[in-house]
Structure formats: C-alpha cells, structure tokens
Image: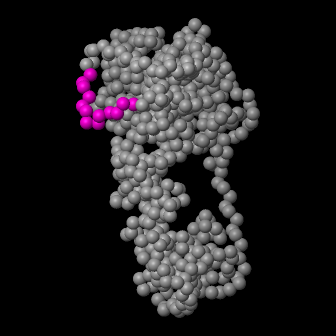
Amino acid sequence: MKKHLFCLFVAMLLCLCTASAAFADGQTYYVDTDGNGSLKLREGPGSTATVLGLYKEGTAVTILQDFDYEWYKVNVDGKTGFMMKIYLSPLGPGVTPTPKPAPTPRPTPAPTEDTTMFVVSTNGKGVNLRDGARKMYASIGQYLVGTKMIVTAKVGSWAFGLMPDGQAGYMMLQFLTTKDPSVTPAPAATKTPPPMTEDTTLYIQTGNSGKLNLRADSKTNSTSLGKYENGTAVIVTHREDGWAYAHVDGKTGWMMLKFLTAQVPGSTPTPKPMPTPPAATEDTQMYVQTGNTGKLNLRSLKDAESESLGMYANDTPVRVIHREDGWAYVKVDTKEGWMMLKFLTSQDPSATPTPKPGQTPTPVTENTLMIVKTGNTGKLNLRADADKESRSLGMYANGTEVTVTHREGPWAYVTVNGQKGCMMLKYLANPDGTAAPDPDFTPTESTEMYIRTDDGLKLHLRQKASKDSVSLGLYPVGTKVTVIGRQGAWAKVEVNGKSGWMMLQYLYGGTTPTPAVPTATPAPADPTATPAPTDPTATPAPVDPTATPTPTVTPTATPEPTATPTVAPTATPVPTATPRPNKATVYQKSGSYVNLRSSMHSSTTANVIAKIPSGTVVDVISWGGTYTKVSYNGQTGYIITSYLK
C-alpha cells in the first residue's frame, strides 16, 4: 500500500510541475549528491552562510519550506537550516525510480583521434563515466584508477571514449593520463661526475640554523641527496657556476658555494680591514623616514648588498657628514656607516611643518568621522600633500578612524592619531563600512531588479562605475537590488544597506524606471531690483499649512522693452529599463542537448520532459535567476538560464 502511494506521489510530481514546490512541505527527501561527497546544512539560504553540518548520501531530511528557486528550509538531526534543492531527491536509497521512456540517443562526437589513456584520481576513488559532457549528466559507470580508456574525441575539458567493458561515454580530462601506471619507468641515467680540479676542505655555513642540501645536480630544484648542518666538513673537487661538487658522508653531489667557507668552525676569523671613511664635507641633522613601518639599514659600504651595521626606526636622528651617489655617510649611536639618502629627511618629526612659499593653509570645511577601507588587506598611506608621489607620513590599516576636515578632488585632508595629512577619498568609508555618498550623483529612478550572471558567479558592487574601482561586496545570483540611476553600462544601486555601482548587463527584471520628480526652475529675478533689507533679529511668523496663500502684489514698474520669452528646452526623458526578450536561443558549448525539466530541480532523478538541441529557439514565459520557464514543442518546463542566449 505504501509503495502504491509513493508511486502515485511520483506520478503527480512529474505531471504538476507548477505545484511541485507546494507538495514538498512536510515531505521526506534524501541527500543525493551523485556520489560527490556530503551536503552542507547552512544557517541561511546562501553559499556564504554558516555551515551547521555535513550529511552523507542518502540522509533523510524533512522539508519545512520551499524557500526559493534554489533552497529548501529543512530539518535534519534536530537541526533547522537550508539545503540546496539540486542535491535533494524524493527517492530514498535503494528505491528504483519509475522507468522513463528511452530518450533520443545523444549524438556521438565525430572521431578525431585514437588515444589510449588511463584513469587517475588524487584520492584513489573511482571516476564517473557520464552520458554527456557535463557533471549534470547521469553517471553510467565508475572506473578504478588504472582503467584503460580509448579516447576518440575531446569536447572542451571532457574526453569521449570506449571503456574495456564496452561502455562509451564522457570522462573529465583531468582524471586521465597517457602514462600507463603498470609500466615501471626506466631508471634515470647516472650522470658523469665532473673532472677533479681541486681537493679542498670547506665547511658548511648557511648563516642561520638551517641545513644545506647535497643535490644530484647543480640546480636548486634537483633531487636532494641529504641535508647537512653548519660546521660539517666537505671535500670540494670541482667548482662550476656558483656550485661545488662535494664529497660528504660517502656521498657525492652538488652544494651551493655561497654556503661553504674555508673558516674552520670555532676558530677566530681574520678581522676584515675597516673601510676608510670619506672626508667630512658637512654636518647636517637629518631623520630616518622610510615611508612605511620598516627600518633603515646602516651599511658598511654604499652598496645595498653590503654588511648591515644596524637597523633604525623612522624618526631616528642621524648626523650626515658626507653625501655621494645617492648615499649619506652618517653617525648614529656611536656607529658610522652609509644610509640611502632617499630615506632621510631634514623635517623634524616633532615640529609643525613649515608651509611652502606661497602656500595657503588648507581651509576646514567639515569635521566628518570616516574609516580606512582599502578593499583588500593593504594599508593606506597618509601623505604630506595631495599627491601620490608625496612623502608618506605613515600607513594605516582598514578600520582606522580618521577625521576629514576638507575635500579637494580625489583627496581628503584628514587628522589621524594627532597627525595631519592627505588620504585618497576612494579608500575612505562611513564608520559602519558603507560607501560615503557621492556628492556628484542625483537619483533619477527607483527600479527593483535582480542579479543574473551567465556563469552563475557572484557580482561585484563597486565604489565607482569602473571595473578597476574598489569592490564593496559580492552578491549571488537572484539578489534583489534597487536601481537609482544609470551611467553608460553601469547602474547605481542600493543593496543590503549599501550603495554602489553594478554592471547593467548582469541585472534583469523590474518595471519601467520611475523618474525622480524634477525640481521646478524658479523664475529669473529682476537684476535691476534692489532687495529690501532684512531684519536679522526678527522672528518669522509661523505659516498656517491649511491657509491659502495670498497672491503677491507685483508693484508697478517703469515700462521696459518687451523681452523675447526664452523657451525652456524639452527635458530628455529618463531611459526605461530594457525588457527581457520573449524568445531565446538554446546554446550548449559541445553542440549537444539541454534538458527541459518539469520543475526547477536538476538532480538525476528529476523528470526530463524533453531534450532541446543546441541552437533551437524557444518561447520564454518568465525569466529567472538559475532557471527560466520556457515553452518548446507545446511543452512547458524549466531550463537552466545560462543555456539561453
């Protein structure tokens, strides 16, 4: 009796595609990932929502709500959350679905090659052979690692071929190799050692606690034959291109010469002769300023590769006694050496900067609290002037609070941690993280639209109408946004409390945009009239909102020549949203077929009511995010939107 009722339910599900979601509530469904691992239970209906648990193939779940076209709200193991519809099936483990009529055979790709390949797998598990060149197609068998496949054609990232059991189908190329795993590779030829040109004992000295590799060849990516600690003695018989052919522990191989020394471990090294300091040509106080949080090296020679005598933080005072070739010979902390001049400044960090000649102090026009928001993990420079090449006064992490006192072009004059300077406005945001309002933008409409991308990826909300602008967030297919204006290929939108720009080509739906009510243009004032003086101390009388205003009496003026009235230009109508077409062409890269289904469900157990050849024109009933409702050959069903052009 139960089996009869279940079959009746399946039949109703296949026939009533529009009512399938209504029947789902309260029913028991089963996890069906087609052997591709466990299914995630999420806290909310989205791929970024918190994962509450992982459930294996065949796990029973209770459908609480058909939430939207992509998610079910479910209960499983006492937990309530959301699961993707595509991985849930009304058929339980071991239940054989009602046989379907044999579909029209999928055309076999024309043979283009005859290559023997072998199945490989990173986890050692079997690999699916499918009846189409996409993961959505049914698996017609699983084959173990090492199974031979005769590949006759390749379709994108898939191979079509014949298996040893006579089964023909598609397998992903990433799981195939031309190397026969049963064949043992021939051993590599032994390399002839180099001629003996010396017999020198050297000692390993890496400069740290690391060990030195003995390698099979004079290359850093060559096989390591062993690792040896500092102080280990080696016999060098040949040197070549920075490498030494060494004998150690009964082995021979190559070591990098720069990590070998003739100095016997534990012996006192011969002191290096001190370089002669240059003649003093000045005595100038300067300060270290690297432009970031790094320290500046004091070096023994005016060479970036020479020995470091110490490292000094920003604002450290030094005495410069000579300059030469971009370097300064300095005295600091009883030491003498060379520092790079470009990282020294004469500006005392404790003093107020002296304005440049003719420079007008920056006016204070506001006092706005904002935060640093670079859009990545980088820090933002505080610069001495509104110029990218200006000296950096410090670098500040995301979330740092700054006070904006003036704006000028793309720059903001700010105070941060008591320091004044300039920061780029595009990297500043409101304290709650939302983008600051654009003072140059005026809303022109209020249209609800939805995100749709051809590849199903998320869409960027950008700070400016440019692909290079800072991303304010990523939003999945189906997200509703409110369009408040348009600029070329971009739409100014509001979504989840944020405001920014999205590309119009990835938005659909909505009605004709409601234009903003234009502000009436006031009549031009009489330029010859002298306004009556206003009493600044007078309190204006309250206005009665219900009263009819008394018409203003226009005083009689001296007759003037009649002016030719200026005709106000006709306002350009606000562009309306472009409606989606009611016809579309089915497109499949492999030139194969696309399934027309009775419901928005693409698991292998969902009912396929037709297979539409690539290139066929269909009637669109209603566009959707992941699925679109269409009519084909008198049948109505659902097709994945990304297959429509």
Q: Is residue 40 above or below residue 183?
A: above
Q: What residue is rendered at 60% in x and 27% in y?
A: 132
Q: Residue furthest front?
A: 558
Residue 548 in view here: yes
Image quarter in which the N terminus is found: top left
Give yes or no for residue 581 being in the magenta stretch: no
Say if 280 sits above or below 606 in the image.
below
Of 248 and 391, the residue lying toward us = 391
Q: Say which of 459 and 525 sits in front.
A: 525
The residue furthest top is 634
Residue 12 screen position, x and y as percent: 43, 10
Could you tell me residue 331's position as x and y percent? 46, 83
Give the prevailing secondary structure in the magenta stretch: loop
- In the image, farthest residue toward the right: 112
Q: Specify the segment rendered in magenta.
A: 531-543
- Give the residue at x 64% y 75%: 243
Q: Nearer the viewer, residue 27 or 347?
A: 347
